[in-house]
Image (cartoon, grey):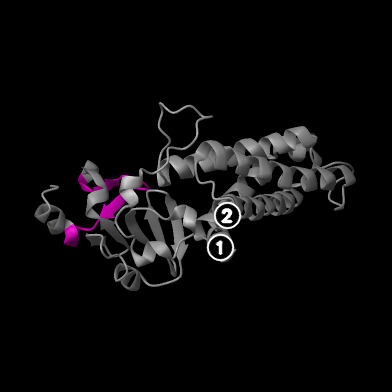
Amino acid sequence: MSAFWVEWKRDLLNQRTAAMWGFATLIAAITGPMGSYENCTFDHRLMLWGMWIGLFALIGTGARAFVHQVLGLRDFHRGGLLTAVLVACGVGFPVNAMNVLSVLPVSDGPYLNAGLPEIAATAFVLTLAIVAHHHFWHGAPLSMAQPLWAEPVATAPAEAAEPLPRIVMRLEPALRGPLVALSVRDHYVDVQTVAGRGTVLMRLGDAVEEVEPVVGAQVHRSHWVAWDQVMAVDRSEAKVSLVMTAGPRIPVSRTNRDRLVERGLI
C-alpha cells in the first residue's frame, strides 16, 4: 500500500495538478456550465466549481493510484476505463446530492440544471480524456491493431531471463521487467520498465548505482536510459529526444549528445 500512497500524494500535490485546478475553476466560473451561470453569481460559481473540481482532482488521483498500484492495471483499455468509472461514481453522487439539497446558501434552488446521470457522465468523459492523454503521451501507447477488449500482451519469458537490477526489484511485482529509463520527479525517481512505471523515494544518482547489469547512460540531468531500450532518435525542431520501447520520450541535453554519437545513434 505504500506505493499507492506515494503515487496518490505525488500526483495530487503536483504543480501541474494545481495549475489545472486553478485554470479549470476559473473557466468554469466564467462560463457557468450546466446552468450554474443562471443560478449563481460569479463569486458563488468560483467557490462551487473550485470545490467540485478540487473533489474531482482528489478522487481522480486517488482512483488512478488505486488502479495502478493496488489492482496493478496500467493498460488503458482496462485500467483507464476502471479509473473513469470510479471517478464518475466518486464525483457524481456527492456533487448531485449537494446540488439537490442546496446545502450552501448561494442560490434559491439547485446550483445546476443537471441530474446524476449528466454529472457522472461528464466526470467519466473528462477522466477518460485525461487518462488517454497521459497514457498516449506519457506512457506506453496501446497498439492500434490491438482491440480494446484484448488482454495485454505478456512480456516474453526470454526477456526476463537476465537478473533484474536492484532498482527494479524495489517496485511492485507487477511492474518488474526489463529496465527502460529512470526519471527524476520532485524528490522521487520514476522507474520505467517494459511492464509499467513505478516510483521510489531516492536520488537519481543512488538509483543509477542500482541498474547493473543493464548498460545505459545519463542523457539529461533528470533522465537515465538503458541503451538496449532505445528505439529511435527524434531530432525535430533542433531538440533531441529518445523514443523508448515503453514510457515517454526522453530529452537529451546538449552536453550529453556526444554519448549518442559514441553509440552511433546520431
Give the residue at x 39% y 59%. 191
Q: Residues within 10 Å of mark 1 (few under 14, many from 20)?
A: some
Q: Which residue is mark 2?
A: 65
Residue 246 in percent (x, y) is at 36, 46
Q: Is residue 39 magenta?
A: no
- In the figure, residue 92 lies in which quadrant? top right
User: Please, what is the three-letter code of the amino acid marked with disc 1?
Assistant: Leu
Q: Secondary structure at mark 1?
A: loop
Q: Is residue 136 above or below residue 55?
A: above
User: Please, what is the three-letter code of the amino acid marked with disc 2?
Assistant: Ala
257 or 173, which lies in front?
Answer: 173
Residue 231 in percent (x, y) is at 25, 43
Q: Viewed as shown, does residue 256 lie left or right of 160? A: left
Q: Which residue is mark 1?
A: 13
Q: Is residue 96 above or below residue 21?
A: above
Residue 87 in percent (x, y) is at 67, 45
Q: Earlier in the sequence, mark 1 or mark 2?
A: 1
In what quadrant of the picture does the N terminus appear? Answer: bottom right
Where residue 205 is drawn, which disc sits there?
none
161 or 155, which lies in front?
Answer: 161
For the record, the magenta segment spans 238-256
Residue 224 in percent (x, y) is at 28, 60
